[in-house]
Image: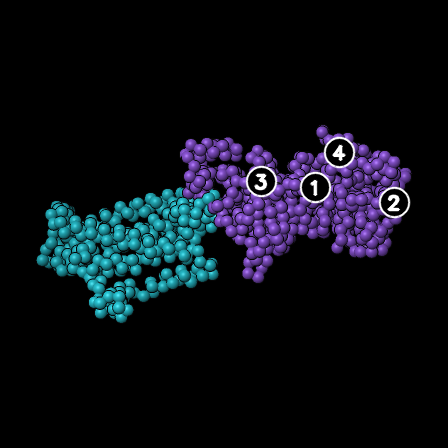
Chain colours: A cyan, B purple
């Protein structure tokens, strides 16, 4: 009995906060835009009984999804989001791996402190942190002032409102999600494996490629997905740091919803985004299962 | 190894060692792990470094593997100083205590790892891996990952991997620690077998003295960064040179007292440390069976007659090799021992040890008379003691009460308390069934041992 209650709680949670909202969004994506409140048609009218329900379902169609294929803005936005997210994930991996490696090789008494430092930024609001990057990267910002002061550059670099700023923002924001799983994988690695590799004739570098990297694979995969999935749909970073030519699907969705007040199209964009995200999520879960099986 | 008479390069002054530690010191900060240590290890040896944890044995092994550099001194491999050669450039391989098998690689790939680093052609690698798999009987498991095989199999993979490159020297760090007793014993013999087949020099680090005695051609007993004694297992056991070694190796009774030189006979025993065939109850022992291929030896009485009396006429017998009696001496059951009418003859010379006010001194005919007046320890192995209810005729007698009996199946250990409270252990082979033995708890018993049963050590 108690077990049943325990199992029911997460399911209720998923039902109330994920499945029902998704069904509502799906329903809106199949509706038509209307000058009304809420701004779409049809509304379900239960007072008319069965006839009302039948009319309601009859009015739903895939018009909005068809519309998305007619304007290549959406396709480009999806593609560009994916490209930016993948690039940013790779940069995060390159930056995060050495940090995680250094942490895992640090003296044991230092590790909790280092871990703390990685998690520390979460104590400040995400929005404020992204805003502060505007202050750093703008033409009159700290970075440009510093470089001009050093005499490295004559005039300020245009970083803010470019894709570079978006990459910086994503890498900065999601770095802990890359570091932590890689650290977890590296930390439990037996150091005698590296000694064994060296003993068998491998150089330090080849021991790293042949032993350390394969053994931290599960951490790398987890970290990459944890960064990739939220950055595809990222909205705050491109709208605050990106420029007019930064095309990301999160921004498009926001504009459809608030500027155009076209809820049905915005919902259709969201549904497609969700479908795109489900692919890496399923891949991620499969690799997790595999890792768990191998660990047994 | 004990029976391999011809193999004793350490006794050959012309033999060149494969490894030479020359006044090696290793410090970690303030801590001195290895203290001015000099040691030779010869080719084809199975050399054991034995000691309690923290004695520096692992540091020595890590210096051989190249993971640590000596702070002072030289380590020579085939005459070449290897102190600063990195581990991947040494013809030395190591089998790690944790096995350190690569969990993401199959058994086959684990064994091939070192060969691939050498950039050998594919066919050669394949042939060598097959050979290693056959040697360690792992053919069936080649495709499995380390987590899919048992502990014993993992141990064999680790061995195969470290042997694959045919190193000049193989280091084994507590290789059998993770195995259960039965498997460990089997594996010990397997290791010896493989060592013999491959002809590789093995250096094994262990804290398990039984393991060291079983597998090694020579054992180095270590304590606090120094080597206390290096010798063949039988000498380590029968003729320890210090109380530390006597106490560390096997079970021992230590009786402390003061030495007093005895009247020297016509010729005092020249070699006090030589182990002798021991006869706990003189008169009751059957002659030792001689293994094949051994030259005939005089029996105890004949030998005594010759060495003490007749040698003046006939000349000395050639020194007999330091050999132990075979592992299962056909010793007569110690009890019941009907006391012979005559007291046994006690060889003259040596020392007697006064250790208690109320009892006659103990006679150690193999003791060095130069120890006269010094405090000494008589180290007596429990199996060298006889135990009986009736007073036997023996050179040395101790009376006491049986406090405890440890029954181990093949042998029993009797814990006997002497009147002054000292506990003495005596070990008897159970040639009779339990019900037929007559000594039990609380019995007053006599412990007896021959004048040469113990080893006299300076405190």
Residue A47 horizontal side relative to residue B426, left or right? left
Of pointers 3 and 2, the one earlier in the residue sequence: 3
Q: Residue furthest top?
A: B292
Give the residue displayed 40% in from the left and 54% down from the top.
Answer: A101
Circle 3 sits in a helix, a strand or a loop, which is it? strand
**Disc 2 and disc 4: Cα gap in Å?**
31 Å
User: Residue A243: which quarter of the image?
Assistant: bottom left
Q: Is residue B188 above or below residue B362?
A: above
Residue A200 horizontal side relative to residue B212, left or right? left
- Residues marked 3 and 4 touching at CB (< 8 Å): no
**Same chain check for tags 2 and 4:** yes
**Disc 1 and disc 4: Cα gap in Å?**
18 Å
Q: Which residue is mark 3?
A: B201
x, y percentage for residue B183? 58, 38
**Same chain check for tags 3 and 4:** yes
Q: On what subunit does the disc labeled 4 rest?
A: B
Q: Is residue A161 above or below residue B405?
A: below
Q: Nearer the viewer, mark 2 or mark 4?
A: 2
x, y percentage for residue B242? 72, 51
The C terminus of chain B appears in which quarter of the rendering? Answer: bottom right
Count residues near mark 2 (Cα–Cα under 10 Å), then give few for <14, some for 14-19, many for 20+.
few
Q: On what subunit does the disc labeled 3 rest?
A: B
Of pointers 1 and 4, the one earlier in the residue sequence: 1
Q: Nearer the viewer, mark 1 or mark 2?
A: 2
């Amino acid at each position: 009995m108690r077990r049943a209650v325990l199992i029911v709680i997460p399911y209720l949670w998923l039902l109330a906060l994920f499945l029902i909202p998704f069904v509502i969004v799906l329903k809106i994506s199949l509706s038509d835009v209307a000058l009304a409140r809420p701004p779409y048609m049809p509304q379900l009218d239960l007072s008319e009984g069965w006839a009302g329900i039948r009319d309601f379902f009859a009015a739903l169609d895939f018009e909005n999804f068809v519309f998305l294929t007619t304007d290549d803005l959406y396709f480009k936005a999806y593609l560009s989001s994916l490209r930016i997210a993948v690039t940013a994930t790779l940069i995060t991996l390159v930056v995060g791996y050495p940090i995680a490696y250094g942490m895992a090789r640090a003296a044991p008494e230092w590790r909790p402190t280092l871990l703390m430092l990685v998690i520390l930024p979460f104590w400040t609001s995400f929005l404020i942190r992204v805003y502060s990057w505007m202050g750093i990267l703008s033409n009159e910002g700290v970075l440009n002032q510093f470089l001009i002061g050093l005499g490295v550059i004559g005039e300020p670099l245009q970083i803010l409102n470019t894709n570079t700023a978006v990459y910086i923002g994503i890498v900065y924001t999601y770095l802990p999600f890359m570091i932590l799983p890689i650290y977890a994988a590296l930390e439990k690695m037996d150091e005698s494996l590296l000694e064994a590799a060296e003993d068998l004739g491998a150089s330090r570098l080849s021991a790293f490629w042949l032993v350390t990297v394969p053994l931290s694979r599960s951490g790398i995969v987890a970290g990459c997905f944890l960064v990739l999935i939220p950055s595809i749909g990222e909205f705050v970073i491109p709208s605050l740091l990106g420029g007019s030519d930064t095309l990301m699907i999160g921004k498009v969705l926001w504009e459809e919803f608030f500027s155009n007040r076209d809820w049905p199209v915005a919902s259709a964009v969201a549904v497609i985004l969700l479908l795109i995200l489900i692919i890496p999520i399923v891949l991620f879960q499969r690799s997790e299962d595999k890792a768990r099986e191998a660990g047994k | 190894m004990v029976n391999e008479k011809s193999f004793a390069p350490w006794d050959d002054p012309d033999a060149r060692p494969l490894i030479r530690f020359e006044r090696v010191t290793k410090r970690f900060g303030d801590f001195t792990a290895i203290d001015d240590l000099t040691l030779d290890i010869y080719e084809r040896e199975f050399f054991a470094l034995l000691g309690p944890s923290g004695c520096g044995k692992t540091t020595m092994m890590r210096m051989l593997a190249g993971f640590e550099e000596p702070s002072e001194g030289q380590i020579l491999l085939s005459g070449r100083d290897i102190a600063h050669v990195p581990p991947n450039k040494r013809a030395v391989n190591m089998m790690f205590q944790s096995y350190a098998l690569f969990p993401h690689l199959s058994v086959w790939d684990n064994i091939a790892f070192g060969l691939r680093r050498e950039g050998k052609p594919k066919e050669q690698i394949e042939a060598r891996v097959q050979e290693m798999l056959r040697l360690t009987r792992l053919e069936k498991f080649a495709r499995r990952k380390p987590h899919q095989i048992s502990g014993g199999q993992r141990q064999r993979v680790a061995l195969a991997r470290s042997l694959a490159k045919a190193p000049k020297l193989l280091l084994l760090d507590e290789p059998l620690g993770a195995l259960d007793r039965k498997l460990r014993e089997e594996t010990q013999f397997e290791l010896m077998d493989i060592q013999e087949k491959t002809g590789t020099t093995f250096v094994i680090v262990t804290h398990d003295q039984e393991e060291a005695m079983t597998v090694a051609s020579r054992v180095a007993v270590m304590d606090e960064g120094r080597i206390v004694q290096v010798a063949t297992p039988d000498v380590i056991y029968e003729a320890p040179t210090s109380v530390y070694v006597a106490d560390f190796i096997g079970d021992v009774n230590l009786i402390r007292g003061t030495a007093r030189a005895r009247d020297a006979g016509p010729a005092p025993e020249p070699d006090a440390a030589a182990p002798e065939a021991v006869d706990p109850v003189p008169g009751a022992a059957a002659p030792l069976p001689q293994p094949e291929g051994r030259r005939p030896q005089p029996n105890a009485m004949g030998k005594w007659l010759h060495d003490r009396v007749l040698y003046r006429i006939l000349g000395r017998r050639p020194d007999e090799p330091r050999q132990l009696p075979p592992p299962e001496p056909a010793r007569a059951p110690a009890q019941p021992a009907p006391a012979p009418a005559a007291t046994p003859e006690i060889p003259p010379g040596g020392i007697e040890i006064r250790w208690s006010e109320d009892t006659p001194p103990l006679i150690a005919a193999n003791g060095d008379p130069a120890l006269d007046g010094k405090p000494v320890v008589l180290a007596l192995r429990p199996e060298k003691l006889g135990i009986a209810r009736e007073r036997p005729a023996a050179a040395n007698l101790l009376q006491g009460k049986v406090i405890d009996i440890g029954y181990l199946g093949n042998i029993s250990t009797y814990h006997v308390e002497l009147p002054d409270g000292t506990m003495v252990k005596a070990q008897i082979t159970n040639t009779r069934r339990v019900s037929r033995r007559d000594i039990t708890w609380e019995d007053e018993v006599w412990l007896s041992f021959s004048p040469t049963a113990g080893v006299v050590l300076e405190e």
